[in-house]
Image (cartoon, rainbow, N blue to C red):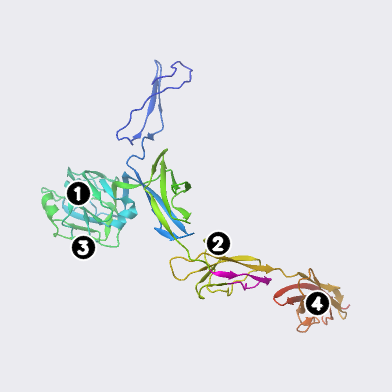
Amino acid sequence: MTGGNPNAGQTSDWTAVIPVPSPANASISWSVAAADAVTSKVETGTTYQDEPLLGASGVATASAPSVCAGAEVTLSGTLIAGGSVVPVGAGSTTDASYLAPFYSAWSNKHEQILIRADELTAAGLYPGAITEISFPTTSGTISPLDFTVKLGHTTQTDMTSFVTSGLTQVYFAATQAQVANTNNTLVLNTPFVWDGTSNLVVDICFGNPGSTATLSSTSPSDVTSYVSVIKTHTAAATSAAVACADNSTNVATYSERPRILFKGVGIITPDDVSWSDGVTTIGSGSPFNYTLLEDKTFTATFTLSGCTINSSPVSVDTIGLATGPITAPSTQCGEGVPTCFAVGAANGQFRWYLQPVGGTPLAGEFNGTLSSYTINTTTTFYVAINDGGPCESERTAVTATVVAPDPIQAIATPSTICLGTSFDLSVQQTGSNQNYTYTWTASPEAGSGITGSAVGSPVTITPTIAGTYTYNVAANDDDCNTSSSVEVIVQALP
């Protein structure tokens, strides 16, 4: 280290060069030690990683290769790299029988485990080299001898029979230690390249010609919807060479599979994903929704620890929209179903929206006129034609104008009377847009002075029973309707 002041009580900056690690993307732990004749001290720095994206690649995908113009496309970005540990199975249960990779009641076994391609993909494994396999255990300490692992692609979809061809030996240990409550990771002698589309078979075999001891072992496992494990063993001391070739002795199958961890090409989590359409940055995140108006080619940029890497581009085409319908507006007074309409297609092919783009059509409204959708304020609709093709037409706007009816106020003069006297009901109208007809009703009706209804304004009412009455007036002028009410107290005579 250079550049600093070593004198006590002085603060200064020191400089040192940390050598480039091997591999270049290794995690680096570092510390600084200071000492004098009296004391010494060590300060540990923050672990860092050079070239965190070394060997990584970005994958960009779109929810569809083409969408209707104005529709959303969902963009997804995935950052993948070799050296990722991908578990297959959650280990929701445990098993201490022959499906556990290290178990045998006779010190020998031949076992095959099938993992379908869609399960590997769902677990997050991508095509590429598998360099390690781990077989977690929760108990077991005795080591199998001549332990061999083979891997292979297969078209078999279950393990009702052994896979007998296409297997490659990837690991061998004369003595294979198993350590309880660890992953028991095997570094493959020869990496295996998974093609990303084939089902994968894991072949395990071992044997001991001088022992029939039980190799106890318990593995976390998961139930599968199909036969995923098959095994054989010999009930006698048997060499690995014999056990590995045996596909028929004491055969048993299981619809349960031990949890396995693969070190291969898997997903790593970036700090950020941003999207470009080749001209500008359009947003960030994954998934990312984008409204497509024209053909576009998108690229994802992944950022991790200050380093960036771009995905390969993904293109999405737009499907042009047919011309929208012809529409005519309407005007109405107060609440009701608008009479605006659209033409240009057969009934059943229209779609009415409240948005110019996106949204969902109004339920049950498929014709050129609205059937049940009511409004009480001026509303703009957007009408499209859906003739069964891949895309709806463009949307045509049409406005239904709502004119508010003149408000009214019911008046009782006076509002408190004695039984046997009369009062007048009248209406005060604000505005002169309507020429209303007034119809009065009372609640309760008995004793109110109105039987059925009374028409006009003013009207004179003589109640016959003491009590409190509500008088409601309905105002009508063609399709304009409104109402008001007033309360009257009728006092009994002393």
Tell me the tag on residue 149.
1
Residue indicated by mark 4: 467
SS for dot 1:
strand
Quadrant hosting residue 408: bottom right
Measured in 3D between alpha carbons, the distance from the residue under mark 2 to the one under mark 1, in whole angstroms, is 61 Å
Which residue corresponds to mark 2? 356
Indicate left or right for 207 with 298 as reference: left
Q: Is mark 3 on a helix, strand or loop?
A: loop
Sequence-wise, which precedes: disc 3 or disc 1?
1
Front one among 122 and 272: 272
Going 14% across and 49% down the picture, which residue do you hit? 207
For the residues labelled 2 and 1, say whether their Cβ atoms are less than 8 Å apart. Answer: no
User: Residue 383, percent across and down?
Assistant: 55, 67
- Reading the chain from its start, which is encountered first: label 2 or label 3? 3
Choose the circle earlier in sequence order: 4 or 3: 3
Amino acid at circle 4: Gly
